Amino acid sequence: MIRTQVSLGENLYCDAKQEAQRQGISLAELLRRALEAAVGPRKGKDRPWMRYAGSIASGDPDASRSVNAVVYGRTRP
């Protein structure tokens, strides 16, 4: 983890501290979560469908070659 320094206005700092306390987390964790939401998912994490990769075993050793037929009902274009 990289350590950094950020300057905040007094009101924003107080509001952020209160919100962190309300959520039961540190100010640093609140800021990390806010930045993650603002920046979006990290590269490579934007493919949620990949969590299912390899979860089904068809028993067909040629399944990767015939995926278009299975998924789209046709052979590869």
Image (cartoon, rainbow, N blue to C red):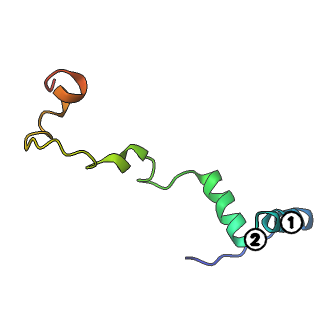
Which quarter of the figure is the N terminus placed in? Answer: bottom right
Measuring 66% from the left and 76% from the top, which residue is drawn there? Answer: 4
Lower position in the chain sequence, tag 1 or tag 2 = 1
Mark 2 closeness class: few <14, some 14–19, many ≥20 residues within 10 Å = some
Disc number placed over residue 1 in the picture, else none:
none
Decide if residue 63 is on the left or right side of residue 32: left
Name the residue that disc number 1 marks. Answer: 18
SS class, disc 2: helix
Measuring 76% from the left and 68% from the top, which residue is drawn there? Answer: 24
What type is the residue that disc 1 sits on? Gln
Measuring 57% from the left and 51% from the top, which residue is drawn there? Answer: 40
Name the residue that disc number 2 marks. Answer: 27
Decide if residue 65 is on the left or right side of residue 33: left
Measuring 37% from the left and 50% from the top, which residue is drawn there? Answer: 51
Above or below 51: residue 76: above
Q: Position of residue 48 (x, y in %)?
A: 43, 46
Question: Which residue sits furthest right?
Answer: 11
Distance in Å between CA atoms under marks 1 and 2: 9 Å
Q: Quadrant of residue 49?
A: top left
Q: Position of residue 15 (x, y in %)?
A: 87, 62
